[in-house]
Amino acid sequence: MNDFLVIGGGIAGTSAAARLAQLGKTLLLEREPALGYHASGRSAALFEANYGLDSTVALSKASADFHANAHGGFLSPRGLMLVGKSEDAAAFEAACIDLNMDPIPLARAYDLVPILNPDVIGFAAYHDEAYDIDTDREIQVFASIVRDNGGAVITGQDVTAIRRTQSGWSVTSNGTDHEARTLINAAGAWVDEIARMAGIKPLGFTPLRRSMARLPAPGGHDVSKWPMIIGAHEDWYAKPDAGKFLVSPADEDLQDPYDAWADDMVLAEGLARYEEYVTEPVTRLEGSWAGLRTFAPDRNLVIGPASDDPAFLWFAGQGGYGFQTAPAASQLLADIVSGAPSELDETTRAALDPHRFA
């Protein structure tokens, strides 16, 4: 008998299991052959604490110290630049407020990113409080915490049945029944499917596709020190990655849960929007992929016990904010389970509580 059984081995599931393993015997089941296979393995891997709804920002800010200092830290400098055309004044100003960014002289913007098109760029803002996250290492550290506390992390496990028992739950994967007192649903785009399997009312999560293209470094530049760049309308963004350049059309296309791939037309349209802002055309793609960013109906994360069964806990709806919120979100989950006081304020906790959908 396990105290906790976590379904899902992305950043949500591994962080949740790491916190819970310090409270009791914990088992994590992941369907794919490796952890972080779906959305977590296709993340833009940026920590930007000012990005998202108020509850997301609160979680991100509460996660900052863990990202920076725990286990040697997971962050490295990147910076964030916002750019807009001359006609984008209103959108640019609103984005500066949302992201807590200050405008900079255009000459400074061209110094930071020399391929910006001076015939198009009308506004730029920048701050250096945005960081790359070592996402793979963070997932592996969380998984190691589970094992170090006597828990187990098992990949390649297809959950085919979930049954409520007198003492908790029986979860069948690959023909084996696993018993647990408490079930944690951290299955990403599949969370509503897991809920249905367990006889729990689904909450109406929507998986939205987000695509990415990998390009050669534009114009042969050394892009390693360039910031992440985002358009004022958030309809594209770009980021250096291991000597290459990633560009996303910032798409949000509704999909059924599946192993997502990029749509060629969506990529082409997004790359065309990006090209309007730069002097170097896109001549070649070195690769592309997509992930599913899964949101609750109100786009706040969902953390805590289901209204129809307190032994079933939601840890879901991370959207594009899974990595940057994981340390504080998983701590909140553990605090709920243990009854410990949370460092998060009451308004934030209420915004994340699954009972808001009851």
Image (cartoon, helix red, strand yellow):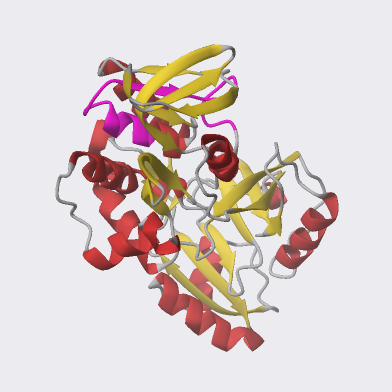
The magenta span reads 15-37
Quick check: is 180 in the magenta stretch?
no
Outermost residue on the top side: it is 176
Q: Quadrant of the N terminus?
A: top left
- For image coordinates 58% across by 74% down, the residue present is 232
The image shows residue 273, relative to residue 44, as above or below, that is below
The image shows residue 28, relative to residue 196, as above or below, that is above
Quadrant in the picture for residue 11: top left
Outermost residue on the front side: it is 166
Is residue 241 in sight in this rendering? no
**Front one among 339 and 101:** 339
- For image coordinates 64% across by 67% down, the residue present is 116
Q: Position of residue 201 (x, y in %)?
A: 52, 49
**Front one among 355 and 333:** 355
Total labels: the figure holds 0
Q: Position of residue 129 (x, y in %)?
A: 36, 59
From the viewer's perspective, is 12 left or right of 257?
left
The image shows residue 131, relative to residue 124, as above or below, that is above
The image shows residue 277, relative to residue 341, as above or below, that is below
- For image coordinates 40% across by 33% down, the residue present is 183
Q: Quadrant of the C terminus?
A: bottom left
Quadrant in the picture for residue 20: top left
Quick check: is 17 in the magenta stretch?
yes
Q: Position of residue 203 (x, y in %)?
A: 53, 54
Is residue 322 in sight in this rendering? yes
Outermost residue on the right side: it is 265
- For image coordinates 56% across by 82% down, the residue present is 91
Q: Position of residue 109 (x, y in %)?
A: 52, 69
**Front one among 156 and 288:** 156
